[in-house]
Image: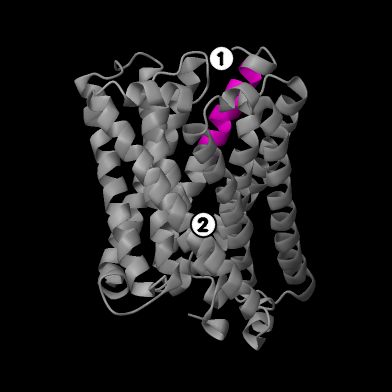
Amino acid sequence: MKLREKFTPMCFLSALGAGGLSVSFFMYLMFLVPHEGVPMATFDFIMPKLLEGTWLSIVIALSLVFILVFAYFHFKLLIWNTKQFNLFKKTDKYKELVNSNAEITLMTMPLTYAMTINVCFVLGAVFVPNLWSIVEYMFPFALLGFTVAGYFGLKIFMNYFSRLLIKGDFDFTKNNNLSQMISIFAFAMIAVGFAAPGAMSHNITINAIGIFAAIFFASVSVLLLIIKLTMGFKNMFEHGISVEASPSLWIILPILTLLGITAIRVTFGLHHGFEATLAKSSLFTLTATIVSLQVIFGLLGYKVMKQLGYFEKYVNGADKSPVSFALICPGVAFFVFGMFFINFGLTFNTVIVKYSLAYFLLMLPFIYIQIKTIIYFFKLKTKFEF
């Protein structure tokens, strides 16, 4: 299927959502499989537990299957979108796009490719034996990959932002949503990617480069978040939010998740690389603050979309909108950070005991959101015939 003029870079959100769902199932392995002395669950810890034949073996087996399934959809949709974009670049619609507010949607590409690096890292960790023994040799390549994503992200954004500052042709009447925050989402994704080697490497140079780059892109994200959140809400209060763009109210959820995980990784990186004191209580306050904000924006977005009839029209109805795939990332993000909140915010501070009844009960609402997100993904995928 060739879309050409009908293509929009927002279609990349389909590949992004699939990649996010793949990574989300790694959270079960990350937090339920014991991995003493290593910061993440790897093949060498996962396989022995898989073969034990306990309840955890079932969870591991299901997680591995879904990691593979959604990784397959991620790469399939990534290739399809890249081909479609190359055709789209040859059309007049592309020239219109790069001279309008919609130019910012090009940021979905570095955003999605940054997710690809994360998916590859997860696949390597869970399916390649003894990977951790050579992980220090892999971190420079991870830094290089995120540097490329960061370069293209900055290039696209600088072209867009400098054009607006020089020409002053930003159309505020079409800014009655939070779609402009896709650039913040992209920079936050790059920041969390850099934070991984910053947190896990035992080479002080890699450690420092990762932490600096994570802080750099996180700082850009926070600065733009303040600007664009203010502008977006001002225009929504003046003109009301458009029905098709209403899922953009949820874009703050993945941004908060990525910035939160970046902060956690930087904290751990400074602890073992720079001998900084690790304050466990700060992890509780940080994770609790982010989950609180996600709940507020989640409820607000749901109420607005429900009243506008968005779900009936664009999810369950016949109408199609690539922006619908923006529903996937918030669901993934809420589940992922929920696991961080339970494990780093509560369990790490001995508020609850790991594997206790309270521990699993607290996971239930986040698992429910994950399941609903999977259902929406397949509904949308079927509708678009990807």
Q: Name the image quarter holding residue 124.
A: top right
Q: Earlier in the sequence, mark 2 or mark 1?
A: 2
Residue 252 lies in the magenta stretch: no
Q: Give above or below for 87 relative to 357.
A: below
- Mark count: 2
Q: Give above or below for 261 relative to 14.
A: above
Q: Amino acid at mark 2?
A: Phe
Q: Residues within 10 Å of mark 1 (few under 14, many from 20)?
A: few
Q: Name the image quarter holding residue 278.
A: top right
The answer to which of 355 and 331 lies nearer the viewer is 355
Residue 75, disc: 2
Q: Main secondary structure of the magenta part?
A: helix
Residue 268 lies in the magenta stretch: yes
Q: Give above or below for 370 relative to 354.
A: below
Residue 326 image point, x, y percent: 43, 61
Q: Residues within 10 Å of mark 2 (few under 14, many from 20)?
A: some
Q: Which residues are magenta?
A: 259-271
Report which residue position mark 1 lands on: 278
